[in-house]
Structure formats: structure tokens, C-alpha cells
Image (cartoon, grey):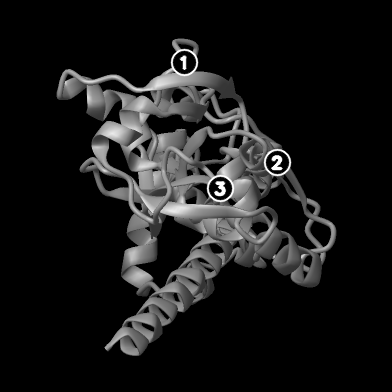
Amino acid sequence: MVNLRSFDLNLLLALKALLEEKNVSRAAEKLCLSQPAMSHVLGKLRRQLDDPILVKSASGMVPTARALALLEPTVAVLREIERIVESPPKFDPATSRRRFVIATSDYVVFAVLPKLAESIMRTAPNIEVHIRQPIVGPPHIALEEDNIDVAIGFDAIFGATPHICSDALMDESMVCLTRQCNAAVPGDEITLAQFLECKHMLISWREVGTGLIDDCLAKQGLRRNISFILPNFLTTPWILERTDLLLCLPRRMADKFIELAPLKILPIPIELPHYELRMLWHPRHEKDRAHMWLRERLLIICRRDSDKNAKAEDGAMGLLH
């Protein structure tokens, strides 16, 4: 009795060629084999299937009844195998209706999404992008559940991400923002004592209500005075404008906020870890062409922005000298 484990599936190609050509030499030529090699394959088929497959007649070789019955299912099986192993169809952003889910913070929505939206609407107008709240907890768990395509955030928040693909998008630095007429901080610098004495506004989705700066302070046995905790940056420029609160935030966002309200940027008087914005995705999407296209868009947008900022900083340093 023949079972799948003992049957050589490569013989199905030979069976199809033999039944279509009804001639060993022509079947060998079709499969780029020598005539002796094809004769050997026919012998294996006969032994595996316990059937002559092709028999001699006055008009040449003719298939047996069992062989004829096998032709149609053999062709169907080989067609399905071709579909499995063939290259996936090319991704065409102009016609695709793919839906992408990105888990990220409002900082990324602020700093990256406008240019991403512009790029997508120009090159892939039918694609849908759904922005979700940032991942809370180990990112690999949410990515493994396949509810999101990409998670974007700072590496200091993500921490170690075993078995998850990732790529750096851009560097960022943290600064402090307050109103220009803050009497507690009259200049353009702030001491650690002033920083700890002032009241702060914190943007956090952590349930415990602390952030990375608080973690750094805690390592030194210090604690800042947090008065307001908000889930996003939406109203912060106008809250700062009307209070003496301090807000620590990414530099790119601070640069925009000082255009909206009479605020000033101060350096944070503590040593902070390097901030690198990264995108994470599950290995199952590594070779997905649509997914690769989205990741490429994000990389191009962020790295262009980084190059632009670097040139601006170099220009500013040149003016100082």
C-alpha cells in the first residue's frame, strides 16, 4: 500500500508528462531529462503505483485505465503546488486597498503622520491607515497577536524586543518648555533646583503616572512635582501659556509649540538616555511586499527629516562661529 510519506512527489511531474505525451522520449525532452533517466522514472512510477502506467499497443504507448483516471487530479495537484511556491503578486500601491494598523503616540502622529499621509494620498489613495494608542507592556505580545502592523515609539520605552524585527527611524532629544514670563525661570537656562521646585505637566499613558524622566530622577533619589497628567499633547501649548508649569517633551514638538504660543525652550538639567525612534514589526510580515512598502515610506520620511534637522543644526553652529 502506497502512502504519502513513502511516495516521491517529484514523480507527479513525470506522470503528467508521460500521460500527456504518451511517449518516453518526448516526455524526457519536456522535462529536460535523458531518455534513460525518464525510463528509470517510469519504472519507479510503476513500482510506486503498482500499475504499468503506459503499455505498448499497435499505435504506440497508451495509458492504462488507472493512469487515465490519475491525470486530472495530478494536473490539479500540480497547479495548486505552483500557486504555493510561485512568487507573490507584485504590490501596486496605486490600486491597493490594503489596511494598515499603526500603534503609536501622538508625538509620532504630530512629527511623522502629516508627511506619511501626504505620501500615501499621492501614491496610494485607496490605502487605509488606522492609528491606535501606543502599546502598553512588552511590544512583542501585541505584535504576535497580529492586531497591528507596525509599532512606533522610543527605544527607551520599548526596551528589549526579542524575536521582533525593528529599524531605527530617527534620533530625538528631550527639552523643557515653559512660558516666557515664568518668574521662577527668568532666563534661558534652568538649574536642577529650579527644575525640581517648579510644578510640571506630564504626558503619559502609564497607569502609574510617571515617565522616563521620573525614572531617571528616581535613580538619583530625586522627584519632581507633577501637577497635571495628560494623555496627549493636544492642549499643552495653551495650558503652558497660562501657567508657570514646565513640560518636558521632544525637541521637534517644542519647536512647533513656540510658534503657537509665547513659550521658551530650556535644556533639561539632568542626563537622559539616548532617544531613538524605532518601528517594530513581527517577522511574519518581513517579506510581505505591502508591509515592506509601508516601512520604506516611514524610513524615507523620517530620515529626510533627520537630514534636514542635521543641516539646520550645522547652519546654526556656523552662525555662532
Return the x and y of residue 232 as percentages of the image width and height: 62, 32
Amino acid type shown at disc 1:
Gly
Q: Residue at x 37, y 44 (%)?
A: 165
Q: Who is closer to the viewer here, 184 or 252?
A: 184
Along the horizontal axis of the image, is 56 left or right of 185?
right
How far apart are labels 3 and 2 at the CA level?
14 Å
Disc 1 target residue? 209
Disc 3 target residue? 181
How crowded pointer 2 is (Cα within 10 Å; few <14, some 14-19, many 20+) is rated as: some
Disc 2 target residue? 238
Q: How many marks?
A: 3
Q: Who is closer to the viewer here, 142 or 267?
A: 267
Return the x and y of residue 124 as percentages of the image width and height: 77, 65
Q: Residue at x 31, y 37 (%)?
A: 156
Task: Kindly indicate whether the residue at mark 1 contacts the one at mark 3 (C-beta within 8 angstroms).
Answer: no
How far apart are labels 2 and 1 at the CA level?
22 Å
Q: Who is closer to the viewer here, 177 or 164?
A: 177
Task: Kindly indicate whether the residue at mark 2 contacts the one at mark 3 (C-beta within 8 angstroms).
Answer: no
Q: Is residue 79 above or below residue 106?
A: below
How far apart are labels 3 and 1 at the CA level?
28 Å
Per the image, label 2 sits on a secondary structure element best described as: helix
Amino acid type shown at disc 3:
Cys
